[in-house]
Image (cartoon, grey):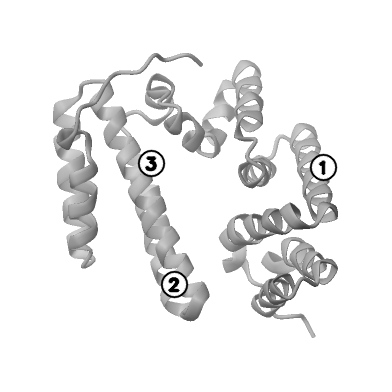
Amino acid sequence: MDKDPGQVLDNARKAFKEERYVESLENYKWFYDNAIEIDRSYYGVRLSYCLGEWAELGARYPDALSELTNLKERTLSNFQQSQRRQFFHEYSSICRVLKCEEETFHQFLQVRETNKDFSHEIFTFVYEYCASKKKWDLCREYLGNGFEKYKRSLETFDHMMEFATAKKGELGESIYKDGVAAFTREVLWILDMLAYIDAPDEYSSAILKIETDLKERGYDQLYSEIYEKSPNKRNFDKPEQPL
């Protein structure tokens, strides 16, 4: 009988809390290697909670850090050999928890030089890095007015809210908080980009769309928080734009 991925993840967490690090690592590795083969809905959990907690384990248990670093190198090799989008997604997720996102960005730039069409398929995995560094010209090149990115962010938000409700408990609460934080961050980045390129009509349309979507879902307070943090509520200085 197949193992329950959720139970394996719980076992990893419990072992970590009890300082049974070898067992914790074994469970995180099993979850990463097998969870989505059993239940595809764990795709996001695998690349977020599993990897993030694995990295936390690595801070206390060097063997776990070595295993995660080796996984990063294997995943990069798999991507370079296959040029598959999934491997780049996995590589970028590992780099994120290891706090070496610049490596992902450099890999993206290499693809951009050799296969511009494919670089559009993987830009989403360096978008957060680019936005956090305020590389708005590059974001504009790949995102246009940001509407498609916003739609994907909203779809992800809806999925995470649904998943959080289904899971309940500590995991459900964590997914809910992370979903709200991620959606807020990405929406503000899109608004920052529109403010930077001085597109007032697109900016106004975006604000109205965000307000409508969130209030329809009952998230009036979240909309108010986003609006208060948006560029039209604070000074916005145009940064330099090095690649």
Is residue 17 placed above or below 141 in the rendered structure? below
Secondary element under disc 1, as helix, strand or loop, is helix
The residue at which mark 2 appears reads as 173
Q: Say which amino acid is labelled 2.
A: Glu
Residue 95 quadrant = top right
Q: Which of marks 3 and 2 is nearer the N terminus?
A: 3
The residue at which mark 1 appears reads as 74
The residue at which mark 3 appears reads as 149
Query: Residue 57 or 106: which is nearer the viewer?
Result: 57
Q: Say which amino acid is labelled 1.
A: Arg
Alpha-carbon span between mark 2 and mark 1: 33 Å
Q: Say which amino acid is labelled 3.
A: Lys
Alpha-carbon span between mark 3 and mark 1: 29 Å
Rendering coords of residue 82 (x, y %):
76, 37
Q: Which of marks 3 and 1 is nearer the N terminus?
A: 1
Dot 1, how many residues are within 10 Å of its Cα: few (below 14), some (14-19), or many (20+)?
some
Mark 3 vs mark 1, foreground winner is 1
Q: Which of marks 2 and 1 is nearer the N terminus?
A: 1
Rendering coords of residue 62 (x, y %):
82, 52
Rendering coords of residue 90 (x, y %):
67, 47
- At x 46% / y 79%, what residue is drawn? 166
Is residue 54 placed above or below 135 in the rendered structure? below
